[in-house]
Amino acid sequence: MDFKVGDIIIGKVNQIRPYALFLTFEDGTNGLLHISELSDGYIRDIEKFGSVGDDIKVKVLSIDESNGFLRVSYKAIPESERYSTHDNSNRHTPQFDEADFTDLESKLPEWIEETLLKAEENKDD
């Protein structure tokens, strides 16, 4: 079976690493589902997304022309179309830890001003 970039296909998890799930597709092609392509949120435990033997619907992002190895994405699938046989409480929407990424740039001028004021105060001591 010839895959193309943009194809939506189902792969079976055959190996789990802390950074990725490795998948095999029906024609024997192998691929990598990197942790960054599972969710936009922080993922503490990749095993919450898949176990060996699970089927996961993914989108083909790139194909290595030399060996046919696929780089795929789960988060690129529209939420309403996501599919995984992983046994968890919410099969179609993986759970992830919420992270607070407050806009540091907006606070920086205030922090600089505070630091300069403290430095001025300490200079007199």
Image (cartoon, grey):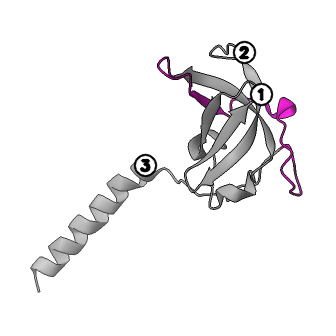
Tag 1 secondary structure: loop
Assess disc 2: are there few (<14), some (14-19) or many (≥20) residues with their C-alpha within 10 Å of its C-alpha: few
Q: Which residues are magenta?
A: 64-92
Kind of residue sitting beneath label 2: Met
The residue that mark 3 highlights is: 106
Give the CA distance from mark 1 to mark 3.
49 Å
Residue ID at (65%, 13%): 4
| 3 or 2: mark nearer the eye | 2
Residue ID at (70%, 28%): 28
Assess disc 3: are there few (<14), some (14-19) or many (≥20) residues with their C-alpha within 10 Å of its C-alpha: few
Q: Residue furthest bottom?
A: 125
* Quarter the C terminus occupies: bottom left
Q: Position of residue 76 (x, y in %)?
A: 69, 29
Q: Magenta-highlighted stretch: main secondary structure?
A: loop
Give the CA distance from mark 2 to mark 1.
8 Å
Cβ–Cβ under 8 Å for marks 2 and 1: yes
The residue that mark 1 highlights is: 26
Asked if residue 117 lies left or right of residue 17, the reply is: left
- 97 and 88: which one is in front? 88
Residue ID at (41%, 55%): 107
The residue that mark 2 highlights is: 1
Q: Position of residue 79 (x, y in %)?
A: 81, 34
Assess disc 1: are there few (<14), some (14-19) or many (≥20) residues with their C-alpha within 10 Å of its C-alpha: few
* Quarter the N terminus occupies: top right
Cβ–Cβ under 8 Å for marks 3 and 2: no
- 57 and 115: which one is in front? 57
Residue 42 drawn above or below residue 74: below
N-term-proximal mark, 3 vs 2: 2
